[in-house]
Structures are given as structure tokens and as C-alpha cells.
Image (cartoon, rainbow, N blue to C red):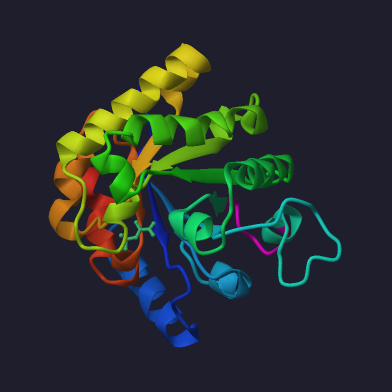
Amino acid sequence: MSRTFIVCGNWKMNGDTEQTLDIIKNLTQLPLDPNVEIVLAIPSIYIAYVKTMVPYNVALAAQNCWRTAKGAFTGEISGPMIKDVGAEWVILGPSERRIIFKEDDDLIAAKVEHALESGLKVIACVGENQEQKDAGLTEEVVTKQIKALVPAIGNNWQKVVLAYEPVWAIGTGVSASPQQVQEVHAAIRSWLSTNVNSDVADSVRIQYGGSVTEANATELAACADVDGFLVGSASLKPEFVDIINSSYFI
Ligand code: PEP
């Protein structure tokens, strides 16, 4: 099964109009591997602005959305709003939303269901923390997080990318090793094969996220079950282009 490599840059709460221009200029001036699907998850307030300047082969994502289309939810944004301003994707369930904003599996599942119903594609993030890793619970934690999403995804697996993001590797400069990443991604596929079906297990794309840089991207991209990256801090730097192009010779 060939799966299109997908790299998403998550700017988090970074960037202003000037920095945005610089990042996009960098993306438009250097050659990008045409076989890679590229997504930028930018602060939602800038989606409409960035939409006017991104190359045609770069899609946009929101970094979050609420679980319903409209109503009295001050400060929130909905799936239809994200689509309306030109984004196709939304990231849901990243560790910062789970830890800082106390989002649990049920809320994340409700958001995934709403986003898919709104016609968005979803990057759904899962990952264990250091304590869980040390206790040997990685697989259990990750599959429990995915299990909670299965009813919400229903028959829409082709619109979902899973991102394995070990919390201990996010923003720490300490990436998981290619062996660790491959092991977890293979375990996710095996779980999907048993608990969803073998087509989904073979076809769903699984990104790795956690201190991906230009220096480790090629080795990580070479892992059989790594289908792309969710990149935080390095997506704000010129090296993001090298990460996008990291699977070119594989
Ligand atoms: C992230 O937040 O998705 C992430 C992986 O961050 P970083 O690349 O900075 O570790």
C-alpha cells in the first residue's frame, strides 16, 4: 500500500503578519517535493490572510475547533467557519490541548465528529507522557486514545491522519528514535487491523511528531510505517523545507 507522505507544520501560537510573509516566501522560493502533501496549521486568525499567498500545493489547517457549528461559545471557532476562510484541515487532540486545556478523549472525539461532518480533514494526535512510557504503557495509552475516536470517525478514515506524538518528545529537542517510532506506528496499525479493519490499518497515514528537525527527518522518514511528520518549532524555520523534502530519496 503506497501512502502519500504528509508533512504538517504546526505554528502553534506563533507568527505575526511579518513573520508569516517570511515563512511563506521561503516556501515559495525553494523546490518542494511534489509527492509530498503539505499542510500549514497556522493561528486561525491568519488563515484568510495566508490563504491569499500560499502556493496551490500547500493546504491550510486550523489548530483546533469546537464541537458544534455555531452558538454561544465565546472565543471558539467551528468546522464550517474554518472551511469558510479556506482551510481544509484541523488538528485535534494535540498534547497541549489535552494537558493545558484539559481536553479529554470524549471531547476530542466530539470535535473530530463535528470536523468531519463539516467536511474538514482531521489530524488526530495521540501520545504517551514520560511516566506512561517509563511504566511500559505506551501502546496501551495510544490505542486507548485511538479507540475513543473510532465511533466518531465511522466510515471517514480516508479523511483522517493519525499523528503519534510522544509528549516527552514535544518541544524538548529529544526526538523518539526511529526504532521507537516504527515500533509504535506498527503497533497502531496492528491494533487498527484487529479493531477496525485491515484496509484502514493499511491505508491510514500515521505521522510522527516530536522534535523533528532537518537533522533527524530523513532517518525517521525511512521507517516503513512513518507516513509524514507533524512539526512544531522547526516549521517556523527555513529548515522546514528540508523536512518536507526528507522522503525524496526513500
Ligand atoms: C508539536 O507540537 O506538534 C510538536 C511536535 O512540536 P515540536 O516539533 O516543536 O517538538
Q: Nearer the viewer, residue 18 or 41?
A: 41
Magenta-colored stretch includes residue 87: yes
- Quadrant where the image shows the N terminus: top left
Magenta-colored stretch includes residue 239: no
Instruction: Report whether 109 appears left or right of 5.
Output: right
At 35% across and 30% down in the image, what residue appears?
139
At 41% across and 72% down in the image, what residue appears?
24
Image position, residue 61 (x, y; %): 54, 57
Q: What is the chief secondary structure element of the magenta stretch?
A: loop
Q: Is residue 98 in sight in this rendering?
A: yes
Q: Is residue 205 in sight in this rendering?
A: no
Q: Name the residue at the bottom extreme.
A: 18
Q: Please state the quadrant of the image where ligand 1 appears.
A: bottom left
At 71% across and 66% down in the image, what residue appears?
76
Magenta region:
84-89
Where 112 sits versus 170, above or below?
A: above
